[in-house]
Image (cartoon, coloured by chain):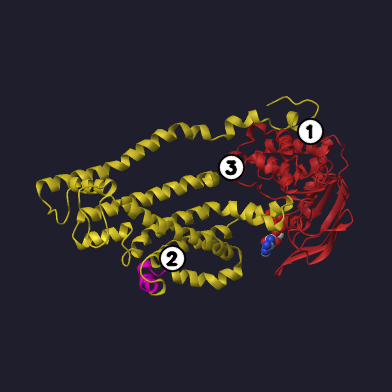
Chain colours: A red, B yellow
Amino acid sequence: MSPGRGATAGDLAGAATDLEVRGLRKAYGAVEVLDGIDLSVAAGEVAAVLGPSGCGKSTLLRLLAGLEEPDDGTITLGGQPLRGPSATHPMVAQGATLFPWLSLRENLAWGPRAARRPDADAVADELLVATGLTGFADALPRQLSGGMRQRAAIAQVLANRPPVLLLDEPFGALDAQTRLRMHEWLRGLLAQRPTTVVLVTHDVEEALLLGDRLALLGRRPSRVLEYSRVSFGPERGRATLRDPRFVDLKVQVLERVLAS
Amino acid sequence: MSPTSGTGTVAEDTAPGPDASVGLDEPEPVITPTGRPRRRRRRLLGLVVPALLVTVWALASAAGWVSPRLLPSPGTVVEAAWAFVAGGGGSTLPGVTPFDGAAGRHVGASVGRWLVAFALAVAVGIPLGAAIGLSRRTAELLDPLVQALRSIPITAWLPIALVWFGLGEGAARYLVFVGAFFPIVIATADGASRVPGALVDTALMLGTHRWDLGRKVYLPAALPAIVTGLRLGLTLGWMSVIVGELTGTTSGVGAMMFAAREVGRLDHIIVGMATFAVVGLAGDVLLRAAARPFVAWSDR
Ligand SMILES: Nc1ncnc2c1ncn2[C@@H]1O[C@H](COP(=O)(O)OP(=O)(O)OP(=O)(O)O)[C@@H](O)[C@H]1O
Ligand SMILES: [Mg+2]
């Protein structure tokens, strides 16, 4: 808390960094889950990860978040090997986890406070606006709807302006129209804060709307079967859904998912 | 919400505005308006049966159905209660245990034992419970012992307490400690072991230091369970006070009651019982009120 350091909003903040994953393996006892995952995500890219249920998508994210140790393989962020969970590569887990005893504002201020940033309250207020939840600043998480909680949980980790963001089926539990709104919201948010994102999803449409890259995982023990670039202009939004080329692409990908 | 200019937030035009979801997402308005009157009515309802019993008691005494030696009339008890609090009336119990005007002294002595021993039980019980709840090793090491010891009735601790601490204050405090200790340990261990790992993970991924986790995550998350343990411990501690006052002391509500028994003053005994009820209830209400701001989030 010295006045010289930590005073700037950009302390932890930084530009997005690239993420390199090489030969990642993980087993739980006799259950082999990941069998040599390779993935490289350039700085500021969104990599969407698709794969059958139980293939190890959440496991992969927990490894990337540093919450678990791989049995083998390496993960580097901006060239640095990953060491444990930290504010530079946070994960938003399936089923948003906000601190249930704190108001929404306090939840959003948690990260900046932990980083001893003097502007924690200002950051929280800014995020309240960014999530469209200004009216709920003093509400407890249980008083929010699922969609609101999910937005809040993403905003909570973005408060520290992490170079890498890991999202585990962030919108999986939401209804179709809320999910669509959330996609647009997230795209907008990421446009303002360049962040390298790994987005796990079971929704092909979501993967294609949000991803710059598409990683297709196979059944357990899983590997990356395909890693392709989603070349579908940067202007993806509600209108994109009606674009015949998009519909075509969706069907193609869906078929490959089913075939895997 | 305020129209923001310049910052160009995405939320403003693309996210579902909060206003759009207020009406659907907020369950509160449905519950609040009907909540209070109903609660008051329920409270009044709780007085009906006691009032009825007192009426029957008064009638039975007036009609002479019960001997005053077995059950004094409500009027006699009220008079005794008044004498206990305000003095006068001239009835002093044998030995050195006063009654008239001695409410302050006896309640003070009992409450003093209670709170000192309870504080000690909290100071030892919460850290021990946390250790058991958070570390599998510690749990394996200590849980069987805790489970065995807590099965020993408070009264069964009395003889050994007398040997260890002698007659009087020490033994009384020890018994209250034992009564309060186990519920606190067990509830704290349970609460600590149920803190969702996802919350701890989230705290770490928000940059929280490991050594801050206890204060910032485990304690608040386990607090509702801990408070339940504290309430149980406080009540059980209060119930143990009288065991400690069975022998070797002339002060305390329990001491007064046993002195009253020796001279057959049933009215004094009933006043003592009522005092236990009122003070115990007051303690619980105060603890609940003090804890409320910290645990209200977990209310259903
Ligand atoms: N902590 C654990 N201990 C033992 N096995 C585990 C553990 N975590 C995950 N697994 C196993 O690893 C496999 C992959 O689980 P994971 O949650 O990563 O899958 P997923 O792809 O995220 O599935 P879903 O799409 O249903 O979320 C499953 O078979 C699961 O049973
Ligand atoms: Mg999963």
Chain letter for mark 2, please: B
Chain letter for mark 1, please: A
Query: What distance separates the C-alpha of mark 2 from that of mark 1?
Result: 71 Å
Q: Which mark is residue A188?
A: none
Nearer the observer, B295 or B72: B72
Residue under the point 55% across and 52% down:
B223
Q: Is residue B253 magenta?
A: no
Q: Which sits earlier in the primary sequence, circle 1 or circle 3? A: 3
Q: Is residue B164 left or right of residue B190?
A: left
Q: Is residue B127 left or right of residue B96?
A: right
In the rendered image, residue B59, in percent from the top left (x then y), is placed at: 14, 44
Which residue in the protein does label 1 denote?
Answer: A242
Chain letter for mark 3, please: A
Given this view, does label 2 or label 1 mark the residue nearer the observer? 2
Toward which corner of the image does residue A65 lie, by quadrant?
A: bottom right
Give the main secondary structure of the magenta stretch: helix
Nearer the observer, A39 or A259: A39
Give the amino acid at mark 1.
Arg
Discs 3, 2: same chain:
no
Nearer the observer, B70 or A106: B70
Q: Which residues are magenta?
A: B151-162
Residue under the point 47% across and 69% down:
B147
Which residue in the protein does label 2 denote?
Answer: B178
Nearer the observer, A220 or B71: B71
Given this view, does label 1 or label 3 mark the residue nearer the observer? 3
Discs 1, 3: same chain:
yes
Give the amino acid at mark 2.
Val
In the rendered image, residue B243, in percent from the top left (x then y), is placed at: 34, 64
SS class, disc 1: helix
Which residue in the protein does label 3 denote?
Answer: A142
SS class, disc 2: helix
